[in-house]
Structures are given as C-alpha cells and as structure tokens.
Amino acid sequence: MTDISSFRSAMSLLAGAVNVITTDGPSGMAGFTATAVCSVTDQPPTLLVCMNRSSYAHKFFTGNQVLCVNVMGNASQEAPLIFADRNIRMADRFSRVKWSPLTTGSPVIEDALVSFDCRIAHTNDVGSHSIFMCEVEDIRCGDAQQASLVYFNRNYHHVGSLETH
Amino acid sequence: MTDISSFRSAMSLLAGAVNVITTDGPSGMAGFTATAVCSVTDQPPTLLVCMNRSSYAHKFFTGNQVLCVNVMGNASQEAPLIFADRNIRMADRFSRVKWSPLTTGSPVIEDALVSFDCRIAHTNDVGSHSIFMCEVEDIRCGDAQQASLVYFNRNYHHVGSLETH
C-alpha cells in the first residue's frame, strides 16, 4: 500500500475540470468546489461526484438528494475560489454569484460552461468519502466559446478556446 | 430525464486527464484509453475507473483484478491514440510503447506523467458501465516537467508546464 502523502502528491498530477457542486431543498442550500466528478454511463445519463463525508456541506447533499454540477469556465473564475473558501458562509457564497434553479431546485450558476442538474440515485460510501451516483435530469449549456478551467499540479489553467484565439 | 445525445454533447465540455488503463494477470494483457478516472479517498489511497462492460477488454480487468492508471503527458502522445484504436490488437498495442511491470504486474507505461498501480477492491455496476474502486499499491512518477494531456471539447490539449515555457 502506498502512503497518503505520496498518493496526494501524485494525484495532484491527475488534471481535472473545476466544478462547483450545489444543492438546495429541505436541508438547505450548500455548495463546494471539486474536481472529483466523472462520467459513468449514458444509459441512463449518469455522472458521479465524490465528497468528503466529514465536510460541513455533506449533510445538505444527503438530505436534499439533488445536486447540480456546474462546470467552470473562464467566465466564472471567482466562483470556484468562493466555494472553496471555508471562511465564507454558505449564504454569503450564493450572494456573490448569479444563479437560478432549473429542474431539481439546485442552484445553476449563470456563468458556468455547462451545468448538470441531477437527482442522487445511489450513494456509495468508500472510506472517508461518499460517491454520489447522479442521474441527470436537466442540462444548461453556457457560452460555448469559454475555455475550461482545469486544476493541475496545484494550479488553475485555462484549456481550450482561449488558447487558440 | 435528459436525452442521451444532449448528455454526450454536454459531457464533452467536462475536461478530463487522458489515461491509458492497463492490466495483466491470469486473464491476459489489455489496455484502453479513458478519461473517466477520479480520486476517491486517501484512507486508504483509492481512485476509481469507469469502464464499459460491453468493451472487449472488460473481461481482462475483471479476471485479473489489478490495473494501472497511466496518466498521459506530452511525452506519451502516441500511447492514448494506440490504446483508443479498436483496429490495433492488444498484443500489438503493447509492442508499440515502452512499459514494465511494477507491483501488481499491470503494465506501467514508461513515458507516463505518473502511474498508479492498483488492486481492484470493489466493482459496482451502474447501467452499461463498471466502476472499479482501486486501492493504490504503488506509484511511479515520471518527468515532472511534462505537460498534462487533457481531453476537452473533443480535442486533446496540453496543460501545464509547456504553457509557461
């Protein structure tokens, strides 16, 4: 078995899209920044989100059983910083970005590259984390000319259309 | 529920690191190119890989119960093309890249940015795909100056060190 520090350091070299994951419902509104999102299957359209079970926001997601994966582009560079900042309260986070509900009621961030509005179909707990298997109920596409915001080697990078302009 | 075509089109905007996933063992050697890999937990160090159950290579992975996630950088641009090409037989794929076994016996590709040599701890089938929960047994880091190869908007992109040189 590899040690935790080597694992974390090596995982920083696995590039990932930067996403703001949001929820709203009976348990209240919450959101956090994450790269641990991936496609699962299109039968039915499903993606997964990994979330630390010890995080403050976890109970909002398990309570509401809905979430929105807002994929960040260069038009929304502040949102991932706001939703990664533990010193900013949940209500204050949402007052600092433009958002609206779509189908499930989860906040869809206006400037996102694309947003996947989902219902949590199953949850698998693995060690410290929950894996939410999410069926996509609705999609909102933003400005297709945006570059994607990617986290790699502990830095943010712009990938895509901006490079070629 | 969203339709499959809209889902696929929107998912092309979720950028992902390009990986070559390999295995070897009693069922034989196989490998394929995938972006559907993500971090799960560091207690114990675990990542997940999604794989289509109908793909030819699937039975090799379920048979061997080990795999290596080779994260691709700019030093290994041909490998992801070779391992995504259905017209190239498995044996021929491995004859066209440099590789060696590490701990589990799965092929570790020499030019990878970083390789995670794993044992499959659990498998969850969701719709058309298997999700392999993989405990990391060993890690090999490659050249830290490499850019990461990222797939976004149906194109390959270089992210990281190359941009700043």
Image (cartoon, coloured by chain):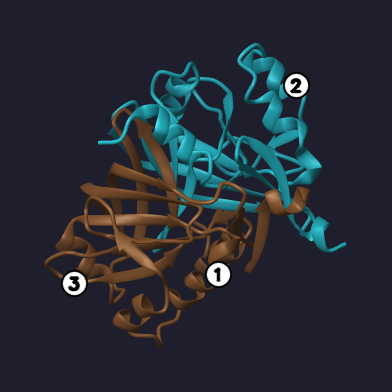
Chain colours: A brown, B cyan
Which element type, helix, strand or loop, lies under badge 2? Answer: helix
For mark 3, name the chain.
A
Q: Which mark is residue A5?
A: 1
Work out whether B50 lies above or below A123: above
For mark 2, name the chain.
B
- Same chain, marks 1 and 2? no
Q: Pointer 2: what residue?
A: B95
Of residues B87 and B4, the one nearer the viewer is B4
Locate the N terminus of chain B by quadrant. top left
- Residue displayed at 40% across by 18% down: B54
First in residue order: circle 3 vs circle 1: 1
- Residue displayed at 33% across by 85% down: A89
- Residue displayed at 51% across by 51% down: B137
Of residues A100 and B68, the one nearer the viewer is A100
Q: Residue furthest bottom?
A: A87
Mark 1 and mark 2 residues within 8 Å of each other at the beta carbon: no
How busy is the neighbourhood of tag 3: few (under 14 within 10 Å), some, or many (20 plus)? some
Which element type, helix, strand or loop, lies under badge 1? Answer: helix
Which element type, helix, strand or loop, lies under badge 3? Answer: loop
Q: Pointer 3: what residue?
A: A28
Name which residue type carries label 1. Ser
Name which residue type carries label 3. Gly
Q: Residue B101 appears at what percent x and percent y?
A: 65, 37
In front of the other: label 3 or label 1? 3
Name which residue type carries label 2. Ser
Mark 3 and mark 1 residues within 8 Å of each other at the beta carbon: no
Q: CA distance from mark 3 to mark 2?
A: 55 Å
In front of the other: label 3 or label 2? 3
How busy is the neighbourhood of tag 2: few (under 14 within 10 Å), some, or many (20 plus)? few
